[in-house]
Image: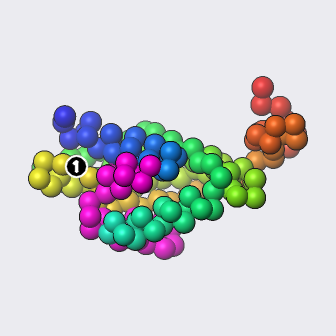
Amino acid sequence: MDAVAAVQRLGVDYCHGADERDLIRFLSVWHPDATWDVGGPTFTGHAEIRWAIERQWESLARGHHWSTGLEVEVDGDSAVGRSVAHALTRGSDGTWRLSVGEYADLYARRDGRWAILRRTATVTSSTVLAPRPETGLPTRGGGAEDG
């Protein structure tokens, strides 16, 4: 697998691992000494990253993440990437939230395996969505029907 495809796969495994609460898959995208900066707290190493994602899972009833528009520049065994991040989450209180932002990443290939060395997540917009009374699922807000 070429470098760009390997890095793209990391984004897929990150999102699915987080949303499916698959700890093995989620941790597989990180190097053991990686750093995850979530816009305030920063977590370094598998133990801290595991702690952080487990706290996130405790606070969210559901989560859906999408990462799009990945730009990657490879230089030997390192690469930098930037992508647009979308997340639709349901808090433990039932509130749905749509957040948009960016992932800025540093990747490294070690022993032939690409993984994230540093991920900085920046949220640029976050909106609470109004639930449909009959289903509890989100609408576009303001009483608008979303079909």
Residue 60 lies in quadrant: bottom right
Residue 37 lies in magenta, yes or no?
yes
Q: Is residue 130 visible?
A: yes
Residue identifier under label 1: 114
Q: Residue at x 80, y 42 (%)?
A: 136
Question: Is 102 on the left or on the right of 118, as rendered?
Answer: right
Total numbered labels: 1
Residue 145 at x, y = what percent? 83, 31
Say few, some or many: other residues with alpha carbon within 10 Å of mark 1 (under 14 / 14 to 19 / 20 or more). many
Question: Is 37 on the left or on the right of 71, as rendered?
Answer: right
Residue 124 at x, y = what percent? 58, 56
Residue 79 lies in magenta, yes or no?
no
Q: Secondary structure at mark 1?
A: strand
Question: Which span of residues is magenta-colored?
Answer: 22-44
Q: Is residue 77 visible?
A: no
Q: Residue at x 21, y 55 (%)?
A: 108
Q: Residue at x 70, y 58 (%)?
A: 92
